[in-house]
Amino acid sequence: MINLQPYTNPAYFILLIGTLLPAMIGLYFGKRLKVYEAIWTFSFLLITFGGIKWHQGIALAAYIIFQQLLVQIYKAYRKRHNSTAMFLSMIILSIFPLVIVKLAPIFPSSQLSLFGFLGISYLTFKTVQVLMELRDGTIKEIRVRDFVRFLLFFPTVSSGPIDRFKRFQADEQQVLSRDAYLVMVDRGVQYIFKGFVYKFILGYFFGTWLLPRIAHVALLERHAFFGTGLSLHLVEYMYVYSMYLFFDFAGYSLFAIGISYFLGIKTPENFNAPFRSHNIKDFWNRWHMSLSFWFRDFVFMRVTFFIMKKRLIKNRIRVSQVAYLLNFLIMGFWHGVTWYYIVYGLFHATAIIINDYWLRYKKAHPNLIKHNMFTEGIAIFLTFNTVCFSFLIFSGFLNTLWFK
Amino acid sequence: MNNTQKVLNILKELTGQDLSGQMDTNLYENSLLDSMATVQLVMELEEQFGISIPISEFNRSEWETPNKIISKVESLQ
């Protein structure tokens, strides 16, 4: 059987959009063809997780059944009771498959990686979010098929953007007027074409063409500067990798959002000119937004709320610092259990804590620096370089340079 | 003290600014509130108005101006 990975080449789009046409014609006439959409989703899941990747397909099916059980059991439970122990057990159970998969590379001889499939981390974000909202009472009812549809919404299944259940459900059930739908299709086309430029032209140029050449020369200088490997080529690698990372991932996100729009679903944006950020805090409001907002809402805010409510730490500045550390450390581990992802997390936690000191200092001394184009330029320059350095850590290239 | 006054007092504590003349200013876009200040805002509102605001309920776009906060609080009372 054939196996195709999402959005990897232009031909894939012809197949994807061609088969989507009946659903789109339905929406044009104000009708959502639910059965057709379900068959379409199932077929594309088969193409993605079938053939040589059949073991991923089995893992995905088992995962969906397991998470569905958790959600339905907790929903029924939550109607009568609300114990913290039960809630925490559910969260732990729900992230358990992801933890196993993330630990798999540490135990190479084990069979742990068999639990893995493309997109498992993104599906875990969605499930945890549903469990948390069931706890908060902001989701009271969630039918089996609604949860499956939300989890397996094909355009975003492999790598996000991470949507929220209530938002998704509202879009799904809304009957769009013809004009409103045409505006969405129009925007979808724009997203996809911008995605082509980002991923297939710029991402390809930086990532496939330029990056291996620079990596090669940078590795030749691994003994430079007292054996640290610090060379001009390493600096070049840092910038080129950063460009590749942005254009590749932003391009992919634009595809996912564009195809969602064709289905009448306003999947949230993932990037908002991140390299124009004027500080690290601003950066996290612009980079991989659906992930950073998820962490903001489901980790950072809950941790700070808990610490302050229980009065575990008196000093509010300290509270936010602890929450930042925890937030970014979890994000680091989520990327993978390797030293460079964890250092990447710690680096950003440190950067945002320093950023907060500076913002408080500036607030206390309002006449210190006048805001103008020059100071804004310096702020953007500093932020850009800090971010690119963090991506060099993230790339794992230092691991190759130093330890391989 | 009425609701408007109470909300403005809380916001003054958090932002250091009297916002009575800028009831429709966007607190997030203008960097007056961040996530940390939002948690403090939620706690103060819960305490002073005796309402409950689950974090999941806190959709920024519904709470982004002083006027929106007041109407949200009144709808939860």
Image (spheres, coloured by chain):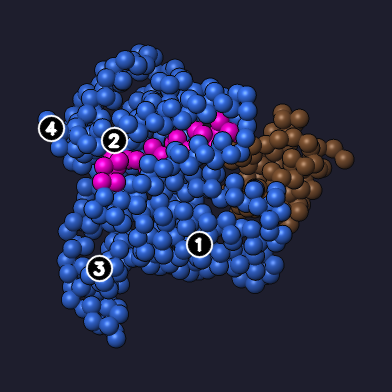
Q: Compared to B67, does A349 lie above or below? A: below
The residue to which callout 3 is attached is A400
User: Please, which residue is most extreme toward the left here?
Assistant: A1
Q: Which residues are magenta?
A: A111-136
**Residue A12, image x and y in percent?**
19, 35
Residue A158 visible in the displayed image: yes
> Going from the N terminus, do you reach mark 1 or mark 4 first?
4
Q: Amino acid at mark 2?
A: Ala
The residue to which callout 4 is attached is A2
- For image coordinates 38% across by 60% down, the residue present is A341
- The brown one among the chains is B
User: Separation of disc 2 and disc 4 at Cα?
Assistant: 19 Å
Q: Residue A138 is drawn in which quadrant?
A: top right
**Label 2 neighbour load within 10 Å: few <14, some 14-19, many 20+:** some
Q: How many marks?
A: 4
Is residue A122 in the magenta section?
Answer: yes
Question: What number is the disc on residue A59?
Answer: 2
**Label 3 neighbour load within 10 Å: few <14, some 14-19, many 20+:** few
User: Separation of disc 1 and disc 2 at Cα?
Assistant: 34 Å
- For image coordinates 15% across by 33% down, the residue present is A51
User: Separation of disc 1 and disc 4 at Cα?
Assistant: 43 Å
Does label 4 lie on the same chain as label 3?
Answer: yes
Is disc 4 placed on a helix, strand or loop? loop
Write down the colour of chain A.
blue
**Label 1 neighbour load within 10 Å: few <14, some 14-19, many 20+:** many
Q: Amino acid at mark 4?
A: Ile
Magenta segment, prevailing SS (helix, strand or loop): helix
User: Separation of disc 3 and disc 2 at Cα?
Assistant: 31 Å
Q: Amino acid at mark 1?
A: Ala
> Going from the N terminus, do you reach mark 1 or mark 3 first?
1
Does label 2 lie on the same chain as label 1?
Answer: yes
